[in-house]
Image: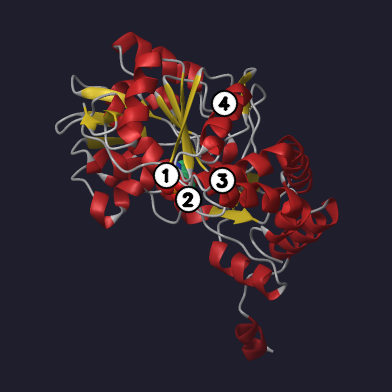
Amino acid sequence: MEFIDLKSQYEALRPKIGARIQSVLDHGNYIMGPEVEELEAKLASYTGARHCITVASGTEALLIALMAIGIKPGDEVITTSFSFIATAEVIVLLGATPVFVDIEPDTCNIDASLIEQSISERTRAIIPVSLYGQPADMDEINAIADRYGIPVIEDGAQSFGAVYKGRKSCNLSTIGCTSFFPSKPLGCYGDGGAIFTNDAQLALAMRELRIHGQSKRYVHTRVGVGGRMDTIQCAIVLAKLERFDWEVQRRQELGSYYSGALSDYMEVMQVRPDRTSVFAQYTVAVEDRQSVQSMLREKGIPTAVHYPVPIPLQAAYAQSCLMEQWPVAIEMSQKVMSLPIGPYMDEGDVAFISDALLATRRRPLVPAFKTTLHA
Ligand SMILES: *Cc1c(COP(=O)(O)O)cnc(C)c1O
């Protein structure tokens, strides 16, 4: 068993992916070819956002979004203390200061009730992350941002396809960013990402920023980046998009199956009733993570930890602030463990993994050698 099974998906889509790649090889427009625009149009209509701009990665999406809203040295950007590092990295790269907010224990998303107290005169944006595939409390976050006149950028790298109160992730705030890293719910076979907005001016800025800030060839009206997504990767996402709704549905069925099997016996991440998760990860919280992981490994079940250290406790991001600011993030970083999930698994696989995990709860957690010593 693999933690993320990309091979079965490829087998299911092999002819479509092959044909899509072949047609790029045939026309030869490897950069900004017709598949780029085709994908942008399809993704825009999928999310309901007016504009979609494909970019080189999810990280680049966040960076370009922050550049478009003019983040500069001295600015503060509020974000979650518990995410993949890229969420905070782009803030620091632009010379701004990330202000980290603690999370909710039962979703691991940013705790919206703690945001307002972190706002200062220098706050220029809020970046909530839709962690594990579930949007954060976007209405509450947007309402706070509106009061202070600041934009909200959703880091939807794990949540493309999720629905929040009838609206799609990545179309829930000023700007939405996603990633097509191979292991994300909608992945390509390399690096890729996309940015979404309903604001025409921001869309234009982000289109130009992704190609060295050029408004026309060799006319540079802004300082940008080399941030394009290449045509072959767009072609691959186009092929995968045809099965995506079915895949999301399978992820949700398997996620519910896990919760049904486990939630009476251990902490599992909760999905709020007004939204869905695409289960980029199925995550539980256990006290004795290391021993549970090794017991599962013995049965051939791989697990992963997203994430073992809250961002503000990473050496490069360590701040002079007190650790007590993020008690929940610190606790969850020590307890969270993600189980294999994916659209090509079946209920039998999930039952096998759940049973193995529940068995670790019943077995005494004493190392075998100690038991023999006492015998
Ligand atoms: C994967 C991920 C990113 C970065 O995406 P890349 O395409 O790998 O650059 C950013 N934020 C979160 C929450 C992610 O999971």
Identify the residue under disc 1: 56
The residue mark sitting in front, 4 or 2, is 4
| Mark 2 neighbour class, 10 Å CA radius: few under 14, some 14 to 19, many 20 or more | some
| Mark 3 neighbour class, 10 Å CA radius: few under 14, some 14 to 19, many 20 or more | few
Pointer 4 and pointer 3: residues touching (CB < 8 Å)? no
Q: Secondary structure at mark 2?
A: loop
The residue mark sitting in front, 3 or 1, is 3
Q: Secondary structure at mark 4?
A: helix
The residue mark sitting in front, 4 or 3, is 3
Give the Cα distance between marks 1 and 4: 17 Å
Pointer 1 and pointer 4: residues touching (CB < 8 Å)? no
Q: Amino acid at mark 2?
A: Asp
Give the Cα distance between marks 2 and 3: 22 Å
Identify the residue under disc 3: 27
Identify the residue under disc 4: 41
Q: Amino acid at mark 1?
A: Ala
Pointer 4 and pointer 2: residues touching (CB < 8 Å)? no
- Nearer to the camera, 373 or 95: 95
Give the residue displayed 65% in from the left and 17% down from the top: 166
Q: Position of residue 345 (x, y in %)?
A: 77, 54
Pointer 1 and pointer 2: residues touching (CB < 8 Å)? yes
Q: Position of residue 364 (x, y in %)?
A: 68, 70
| Mark 1 neighbour class, 10 Å CA radius: few under 14, some 14 to 19, many 20 or more | many
| Mark 4 neighbour class, 10 Å CA radius: few under 14, some 14 to 19, many 20 or more | some
Q: Amino acid at mark 4?
A: Ala
Q: Position of residue 49 (x, y in %)?
A: 53, 19
Give the Cα distance between marks 4 and 2: 19 Å
The numbered disc on residue 191 is 2
- Asked if ligand 1 lies within 8 A of label 3, the reply is no
